[in-house]
Image (cartoon, grey):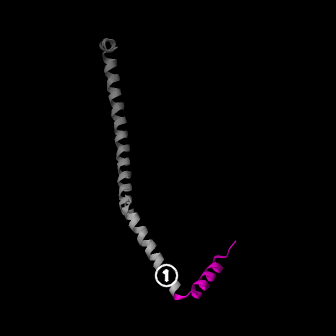
Amino acid sequence: MFNPQKLEEIAKQVSDAMPEGVKSFGNEIDRKVKQVLQAQLGKLDMVSREEFDVQTHVLLRTREKLNQMEEKFAQLEAKLDQNNSASTDKNPSENNSTNIEKE
């Protein structure tokens, strides 16, 4: 479509042809817009990139710990089930009466 190099060249020519007052006015507008944007963004409840990265790292560590705890919990449940099934095998009559009472 458009040649970016040609567009840059045209923009430079237009900029060079502008009177100095117009250029400084444009620079002043840019500065004022930046000030207003910074002030308005400062009012928003936002965090810095650094704080966001720190919190992301904390979240990843927390997820890892949660996964480890879930795995350990599953192992403990399996061990408990094994112990319960072993005790059921040893005393089937005792466990049957206990199960009947629970119902």
Going by the picture, which residue comes out furthest to the right?
1
The residue under the point 30% across, 14% down is 98
Q: Dominant secondary structure of the magenta stretch?
A: helix
Q: Is residue 58 above or below residue 91?
A: below
Q: Which residues are magenta?
A: 1-20
Q: In the displayed structure, does residue 49 sit left or right of residue 24?
A: left
Residue nearest the observer in this picture, 59 or 17 = 17
Answer above or below: position of 43 versus 21. Answer: above
What x and y, as percent, mark residue 12? Answer: 59, 84
Q: Is residue 64 magenta?
A: no
Residue 31 relative to residue 87: left or right: right
* Image point (40%, 68%), residue name: 38
Residue 16 within the magenta-colored segment of the rendering: yes
Disc tally is 1
Q: Is residue 16 left or right of residue 40?
A: right
Q: Residue tagged by mark 1?
A: 25
Instruction: Using a 10 Å C-alpha cutoff, classify the residue at mark 1 as few (fewer than 14 neighbours), some (14 to 19) or many (20 or more).
Output: few
| Image spot of residue 31 (x, y percent) | 44, 76
**Screen quadrant of the C terminus:** top left
What amino acid is labelled 1 in the image?
Phe
Question: Is disc 1 placed on a helix, strand or loop?
Answer: helix
Q: Residue 22 location, x and y as percent?
A: 53, 84
In the displayed structure, 47 sits above or below 78; it is: below
**Residue 10 falls in image quadrant:** bottom right
Q: Quadrant of the N terminus?
A: bottom right
Residue at 55% x, 88% y is: 19
Q: Is residue 93 above or below residue 71?
A: above
